[in-house]
Image: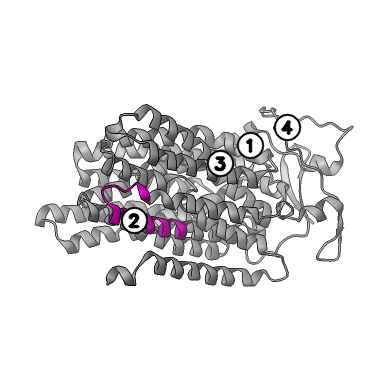
Amino acid sequence: VRIKIFSPRHILNACLLFVVLCDRHSTMAEAGKDDSARKTLTWVGLFLGELRDGLTMINMQSAFLIASKHYTEKQAGALFFVFGISQFLFQTPAGYIMDYSDKKVHLLAFAAIATTTLTVITAMTAEENGANLGWMIFIKFLQGAVTALIPCGLNSITQGIVGTVGMTQQVSRNEMMNHLGTAIIVFTGSFIAYNQYPDIGTLFIVSPISCIGVVYFLSRIKPDDIDHDAARGLVIESKPTDVAQSGGVDSQGGLNQPAAVNKTTPSFNFGFSAPTKDDSSATASQEALRADTPLQVMRDPILLTFTLICFLFHAANGCILPLVMQSLALEGGRSGILLSGFCIIVAQTFMVGTAKICGEKSALYGRKILFLIGFFSVPLRCLILTGLLYLRDLNGSSLFLQIVILSTQVLDGIGAGAFGTMYILVTSDISGGTGRFSLTLGITTAAMSIGGTVSGYLGEALAEDLGYREAFMILGLMALVPALLYLFCMPETLPAYNTPGANAQPDMTKINEDEEGTNYVELT
């Protein structure tokens, strides 16, 4: 009876109703604008929940390989490590490509299809006891490479549609749908795996279903919806392509000047100096829209500090969820698979609410305070887990204690939920005016990828050599480092034009240079 009442169909219908209500409420304030592309983005975000960084499917693949194909933990860990290293290697190049390409939608659709295909290949070709481990390592390397296109692809399309001014609300909306989509997919996959155990390969049917949704809604985004200068961070407000190219009358009654035609082929000027100007072929407007070189971007001390913080945060936080699941001794066959999924569902559910709060409050209170709440929730979580495991070692395990340990996933929803939304917004703030938003996002995301990879090995080693309680204690101390770095070394990055008191979106924005060659933003 319980299964009939809470079947996946009922859960999915309820979640989709929640999506529609949230989407309708969040777009009411944007009257006077064609927001069909914004609505489409929320649906893309929902179906990208499983695909966006590949980690959800990688975790489910690990469960499948261990439970159904009798892989050892080390063999599954090796695949996870290769996947993480591949993402690290390809994140920054993927961002560089996305900055220059005007085919962002096509690239994102390709990445979704490719990673889905590789997931299905994993399920179909994996052999017992890791007999073809070399082949599986190659598949995971390819999957890490193609998933590197997804974060920068989704967020550059988002910035191209809403502009930097609209990023706060839209990124929050995207992240809400990402987390909700992940929760739905994990619940459905776990339910399938529970009923099909131990042959749980059929759970991967959720992957092509998600991919179909992503490709369908991406196909509904029109080319004219994306301002590629805004997507790169060259201009702050997104303008429709047809108006920007032809000129005309803006919403305030003023004349729009024809926009410069942006170069869409890669530049190989990697130097620190500004790009060489060709006065014979460029207008003054075009000169104002020149992007910084990659090395100019990478020598920004704020970006370097933030990149280090991203690495340290994921080095501490990345392995806590697997250790929580292991510390609960979830090796109970069918129920173990179901409860493992429930650990993720609890966190993802609270991440939806956290993402919504970050979108509503970050413009009011600033990025820093919300980011710090997320950062300090991790050492608090580790402290609570250390105490709970001490009580379990002292008094023995009980169902109540297991539920309390599982409930610490609420703090995971706060910490990871805040980070997932705020790191995109802070990256957008830092890269504003450089024309290198996707490249900058690739750098910060690459730091997260290698941090998570290091965390996976470090956490397991600490748990094996010292015990789970000591592992959580050490990880909690490690998590204090990025929190304190952000508190004392990172400035508030919220731009003035995103504060509630500022005049809502400026009519025209461009990047100029002063006599010393320093970029500044001019709002007219």
Q: Are marks 3 and 1 in contact (CB under 8 Å)?
A: yes
Q: Tell me how far mark 3 sits from mark 4, CA to CA.
A: 27 Å
Q: How many residues crowd around disc 2 within 10 Å: few (fewer than 14), some, or many (20 or more)?
A: many
Give the vertical position of 111 relative to 325 (above or below): above
Amino acid type at image mark 3: Leu
Mark 1 or 4: in front is 1
Amino acid type at image mark 4: Ala
- Residue at 41% across, 46% down: 57
| Residue 330 image offset from top left, x and y in percent | 22, 51
Q: Secondary structure at mark 2?
A: helix
What residue sits right under mark 4 in the picture? Answer: 274
Placement of the N terminus among the 4 image quadrants: bottom left
Q: Which residues are magenta?
A: 179-202
The first of marks 1 and 4 along the sequence is: 1
| Disc on res. 97 | 1
Mark 2 or 1: in front is 2
What residue sits right under mark 2 in the picture? Answer: 192
The first of marks 4 and 2 along the sequence is: 2
Amino acid type at image mark 2: Ile
Q: Secondary structure at mark 4?
A: loop
Depth check: 466 or 153 in front?
153
Q: How many residues crowd around disc 1 within 10 Å: few (fewer than 14), some, or many (20 or more)?
A: many
